[in-house]
Image: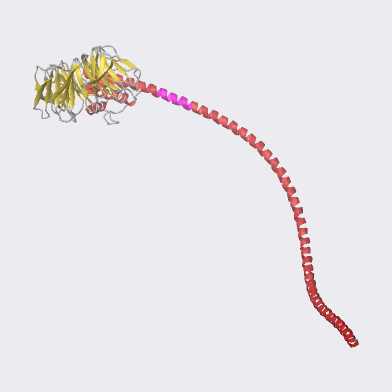
Amino acid sequence: MLLAGIAAGGFIGWHSEHKKVKDLQVRIDEMKKQEMRSTVMRSVSAQMEDIANEQREISDEKREEALQQTRVANEMRLRSEHERQNALEAERDAVASEKRALEATAVAETQRERAEEQQRLAEEQRLLAEHQRIQAEFSKRKADTLSYIALGRSLGSISSLQLQAGNVDLANLLGYASYLYTSRYGGDVYYPAVFQPLMDLSQSKLLWTEHVGAVMNIEYLPGQENTLISISNYGEIILFERQGTRLKTNVLFNNSKFDFRDVIVDTTTGSIYAVSRTGHLVIIQNDLKTVKTLTLDNVEHPMRLHDLNERSMLVVGERALALVDLKQQVVSGTRQLPFRVTMGSRKNKLPLLFDDQDMMHLVKGLDDYSTEKVPVSGHVTAYCESKNTGLEAYGMSDGTIWLFDKHGKGQKLIGHRSRVSKMKMNGRRLYSSSYDGTVNLWIADKEKIDPMTLVETDKWIMHFCFDSKKNTFWLGDVKGNITAVNISVPVMVETVKKKLKRDLTTDEWNFYIGREVPYESFTGNRGKEASP
């Protein structure tokens, strides 16, 4: 037990020493580690010190640079302040300059406005002066125009007197001068004093006596300008062709028992249809030899033919209508009328019939017609219309003509002395013939419409027609005469001009035209005065 106690005590002592040794060893190891860490830290501290020294040097350099930049910034600030002061000074100067500029601008604007006002006033004065100059020139031209137009009419009248006296050369010169001054200054070349001498000098009127009875109708053959058909109330149907001043005729039918009143030519077959008041329809085939006569039963006093279409033709009698089949050349139907027809014409390509009760009837077919009152009082003897202008004309038995526009406004035209026998309209030009022996031209382009006489004879004019160019009139009168009249002013003037053999002498010029009018040649020999 003692040993055990000694051993236990020894073991405890050893264990205690051993633990102390172990603790010391741990401390030594820890101290070694701390020493090592201290060494590292000293090394790091040395390095950090070096770095700090370097940073301090850099910081010193930066600080020097910062100081330098501060000095520069201060200098720049001072300069900026100086510049700001300069800018403020410049701004004050600019404001002052702007104020002065605005004041100068206001003054300049005022001066500009004054200048513009003066310019406007000057322009108004210039325009006024220009207007006065134009007015003066216009007044002078107007005076000159009126003077020359009056001269043209005067020369035309003198030309007619010279022609009657047999001085043909002088008459031609004066007639041409009459036209020249009238047309050059915008005058009316259809004025009788100008137009009639041209007709007489150009010998525009040619007359042939071919019929025994009164010529009731003249129609052109389709597509032919010089070949026509004429009929008379003595039963004559004549084909004639103009060859210059000659008239070549061919009597196609002649029977005094017939009283022809109307004729048409079938544009498709070329057949000729002539209706007689005796109640017959004479058909001449296109060979001009074969003749066929149809009796129009129950059609009293036929007076008018109308081609309705390519197959049918309407015959108008005093109290009945008849329909003719053009293919079969037979009467296909008739219709009695509840009124008495006094005159037939055409409107909108349809037959227009006038009766003795002041009514007119537009026929659309044998059993279809419309009726309305004639817009004028009296006996209508002729009618025509213009599709382009909407004008309508009614010729009366007393010689007056009523002209209506498309709005229904009427105007009374006075110029004929007896019954109006025929009228045709071309646009605003109205041609009319009368039993007083005249053909008049009316131009419906102004409020007062005066007639211009194109043809004047001493015989009743029963019918007229003109060619497609409206240059030649063909007249048929009560004595059986056929008259061709050229009404083309350019053609007449050219004919007269070709007849000029010389120019006016100086004495003739001064006497007939006047010293104040510059001399000119009418023959083209300018500068060469011909001898009388």
How many numbered circles does the render carry?
0
- Mark yes or no: residue 402 visible: yes
Does the magenta portion include 179? no
- Residue plotted at (76% across, 60% down): 69
When asked about the image quadrant of residue 150, the answer is top left
Closer to the camera, 97 or 2? 2
Where is residue 139? Give x, y as percent: 41, 22
Q: Give the side of residue 409 with respect to residue 486, left or right.
A: right
Where is residue 352? Give x, y as percent: 24, 20
Quadrant occupied by the N terminus: bottom right
- Mark yes or no: residue 505 visible: no
Q: Work out which residue is located at the far right of the displayed protein and give it.
A: 2
Q: Give the side of residue 53 with respect to residue 123, left or right.
A: right
Q: Work out which residue is located at the far front of the displayed protein and give it.
A: 1
When asked about the image quadrant of residue 27, the answer is bottom right
Q: Give the side of residue 522 with respect to residue 119, left or right.
A: left
Quadrant occupied by the C terminus: top left
Does the magenta portion include 131? yes
Closer to the camera, 98 or 327? 327
- Residue plotted at (69% across, 43% down): 94
Closer to the camera, 413 or 109? 413
Display coloring: secondary structure
Q: Magenta: predominant secondary structure element?
A: helix
Where is residue 115? Give x, y as percent: 58, 32
When asked about the image quadrant of residue 59, the answer is bottom right
- Residue plotted at (28% across, 12% down): 377
Over which residues does the magenta segment extend?
129-140
Q: On screen, 488 above or below 436?
A: below
Q: Give the side of residue 361 with respect to residue 332, left or right.
A: right
